[in-house]
Image (spheres, rainbow, N blue to C red):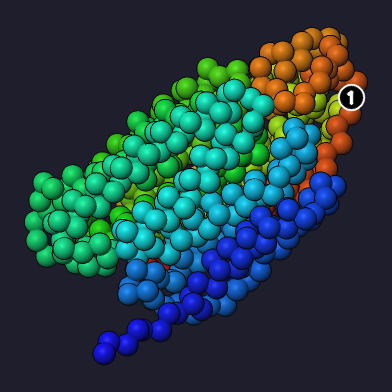
Amino acid sequence: MTSIPPVPLGLLAPELVVLAVAMVVLLADLWLPPARRGLLVVAAVAGAVAAAWLGLGLPDGVGFAGTYVRDGLTRAGQTLALAATALGLLVAPEYLRRGGLDRGEYYFLVLVAGLGAMLMAASRDLLLLFLALETLSVPLYVLAATGRGSVRSQEAGIKYFLLGAFASAFFLYGVALVYGTTGTTRLPEIGAAFSAQPVSASAAAGVGLLVIGLGFKAALVPFHTWAPDVYEGAPFPAAAFMSVVAKIGAFVALVRVFPMTLGALALHWSALLGALAVLTMVVGNLAALLQTSYKRMLAYSSIAHAGYLLVGVAVGTPQAVGAVITYLLVYAAMGTGAFAVAIALERGGAEADRIDDYAGLSARAPLLAVAGGLFMVSLAGLPPTGGFMAKLGVFLAAADAGLPGVILALVGFLTSVVSVYYYLRVAYVMFSPAPSAGVTPAQRSGVVHADATAIAPGSGTAGAAVRLHASPLLNLAVLVAAAAVIQTGILPSTVAALGAQVAALLR
C-alpha cells in the first residue's frame, strides 16, 4: 500500500495567510456596515504584512513533488508582491467610496491577485506556473471591469479577458511543446534536458510561446496593445494595482525560466529578449510622447519600463538579474504613487484623466504636488531618486556583459532621455497656475461613476479654489511610496540585499 507523502504546508505559510485574510475579508463584508468597511483594508494590509513576516523566517526548501520552491527568488518575488498588494489596498477605499463601489469583493480580488504573483515567484514547474498565472490574471480581469457605472470600464474588462485568454492559450501550448520535447514540466529537468541535447524546432517554438504568454502579462511589445485601453477604462485603483503586480509576477517568472533554468542556452534566447527589449523601450516612450490622457501616458510609461526590466533579463548575468529585482521594487513605489496622486483628484465621480486636469495642484495640495513631481522625476530616471539608481543598475550590468549589452544599455539611455520630456511635462503642469474656469474632467474624459454629480466650472478638479483633502489611507500610501523612492535613491544599499539574494542563485 502506497503511503501518502506529507504535505509541507509550512512552505506555504505566507500564501496561506494571504488566502485566509482574503476569505475573511469577503465574508466580513456581509456583516460589516458600510461606514466600517475601511476595516477591511486595515485587516487585509495587516494580513499581507503578517505573511511577509512569516516568509522572511522560512528556510529554503522544495515541496509538492518538486513543483514548489522557496529560495532567494521566491522570497524576493513574494516580498515585492506583498508590497504591491499592500499599496494597492491602501489607495483604493476613498475612490471606491466616492464611486459607490466600496464592496469587500474588491479587496478580495486584490488579495487573490497578489497570491497569484506570490505563487508565480515560487513555481518550479510550468504547470504550477500556469495555474499561478491564471490566479493572478482572472482577478485582474474583474478588477478592470469594477467601474459598473462606466461603459469604458466594462469594455476594458472584456478586452483584457479576451486577449488574456489568447495569451494563456499560447502559454499552455508552449508548455505542451516543451513537455513533448523533454518529457517533463519541471524547470530544473527542462534545463538539464535542453543542455544535454540540441534544441529542436518544437522546443524552440515552445519556449517562444512561453515568452508570448509572459510577455502579454508584462506588456512587452508587440504584446502590449491591451494595456493603454485597459488602463484608460479601468478605475484608477485597479489600473494602479495591475500596472505593478502583473509586472512583478511576469518578470520574476521570466527570471526563473530563462537565466535560472536555461542559462546554459543564453545564446539562443538572449537575442530574442534583447530585440523585444529594444522594441518595447522605443515604442513605449515614443507613444507616451503623444498622450494627453494621464492614464494612457502611464500605460505607455509602464510599457517602456517593461523594456528596461527586460534588458536585465536578456543579459542574464547575476548582476543584471539582481538589478531587475531592485528595479521592480522601485517601480512598485513610483508607479503606484503616480496613480495615487490621480486618485486624490477624483471628485464627484469624475476622474482627472487629462494631464491638463493637474494644473494648479500645487496651490490646492502642495505636498501632493511635491509627491507627484517626485514620482515623475523618478519615473524619468533622474537623480537623486530610486528610479535613477534602478536604471543605472540595469544599464551598468548590461554594459559589463559585452557588446550586445552595451547596445541595449545605449538604447535604454537614449529612450530614457526621450522620456524626460513627457514626465517633466506632467510635473510642470502640476506646478503651473490653474485656469480660472473650464470644463470638468467628467465632461472632458467621459469617465463618470453612476452617482457622479456635476462640478461647476472653475471649482472642480480643474479649478484652483477647492483644496484637496485625501483620506488618511491614501495619504499613507503616497507617503510610503515617496519615502521608498527617496530612500532607494539616496541609500540604495538598503534594498540591495533583495537583489543580492537572487543574484547569488546564479553564481
Q: Secondary structure at mark 1?
A: loop
| Quadrant occupied by the N terminus | bottom left
User: Callout 1, which amino acid?
Assistant: Val
Residue 150 is drawn in which quadrant?
top right
Residue at (66% x, 17% y) in the render: 446
Asked if one can make out residue 492 in the rendered structure from this viewpoint, the answer is no
Q: Which residue is mark 1?
A: 466
Disc 1 crowd rating (10 Å Cα; few below 14, some 14-19, many 20+) is some
Q: Is residue 131 above or below residue 124?
A: above
Asked if one can make out residue 302 in the rendered structure from this viewpoint, the answer is yes
In x, y percent, where is residue 410?
Answer: 39, 36
Q: Is residue 110 above or below residue 351?
A: below
In x, y percent, where is residue 311?
Answer: 38, 44
Could you say which is closer to the camera, residue 174 or residue 429?
A: 174
Q: Is residue 459 above or below residue 302?
A: above
Q: Is residue 202 above or below residue 25?
A: above
Residue at (24% x, 46% y) in the render: 173
Could you say which is closer to the camera, residue 282 or residue 223?
A: 223
Residue at (19% x, 58% y) in the render: 179
